[in-house]
Amino acid sequence: MIVFDKSNARQYSLGMKEKTDPPVVSALFGATRRSILFLLCAMPQKPFYSRQLVNAVSTGQGGVYRELKNLEKAGIILRFREGHRVRYMINQRFPALPELRQLLKKLAEHSYTRNI
């Protein structure tokens, strides 16, 4: 069973980016979006700077920024400024957050067991 916590967030977010994902997994969430959501769900009280997310998901800056913009627009994540810097965190009031977390867990379990 996959548990969302900071000790495994990076491991599973990186593991979920494998090219061996079945088509249904890739169709539901692209690798960058899955990685961002997994990290933010794993540490819901922790706001992340965009640079931290870029480094954590090990992908291009443009792709991460595009996904952050889309997730914020959908209301899934919150964006707030601290001076000149911007931070992101999961929106605890997003109506479908419990279901989203469950889906991400299932995808992580599937991806993890597929890569063993």
Image: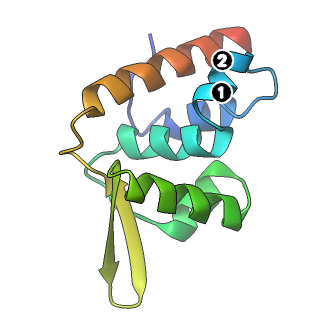
**Along the line of sight, the residue nearer the viewer: 61 or 56:** 61
Q: Is residue 116 visible?
A: no
The residue that appears at 53% across and 63% down in the rendered structure is 52
Q: Residue furthest right?
A: 19
Rate crowding at label 1 as few (under 14), some (14 to 19) or many (20 or more) other CA atoms within 10 Å. Answer: few
Q: Is residue 61 visible?
A: yes
Q: Secondary structure at mark 2?
A: helix
Q: How is the image coloured?
A: rainbow
**Along the line of sight, the residue nearer the viewer: 52 or 76:** 76
Q: Secondary structure at mark 1?
A: helix
The residue that appears at 63% across and 17% down in the rendered structure is 112
Please determine whether, in this image, residue 75 is positioned above or below residue 24. Answer: below
Location of residue 114 in the rendering, given as x and y in whole percent from the top left corner? 71, 10
**Residue 24 numbered tag:** 2
In the image: residue 102, left or right of residue 28? left
Instruction: Indicate the amino acid at tag 1.
Output: Ala
Q: Residue 107 appears in which quarter of the rendering?
A: top right
Location of residue 39 in the rendering, given as x and y in whole percent from the top left corner? 46, 43
Please determine whether, in this image, residue 65 is positioned above or below residue 34. Answer: below
Instruction: Indicate the amino acid at tag 2.
Output: Val
The residue that appears at 58% across and 27% down in the rendered structure is 28
Residue topped by disc 1 = 27
In the image: residue 35, left or right of residue 104? right
Quadrant for the C terminus, please: top right
Location of residue 41 in the rendering, given as x and y in whole percent from the top left corner? 37, 39
Quadrant for the N terminus, please: top left
Tag 2 near tag 1, CB within 8 Å = yes
Q: Residue furthest bottom?
A: 84
| Distance (Cα) linking label 2 and label 1 | 5 Å
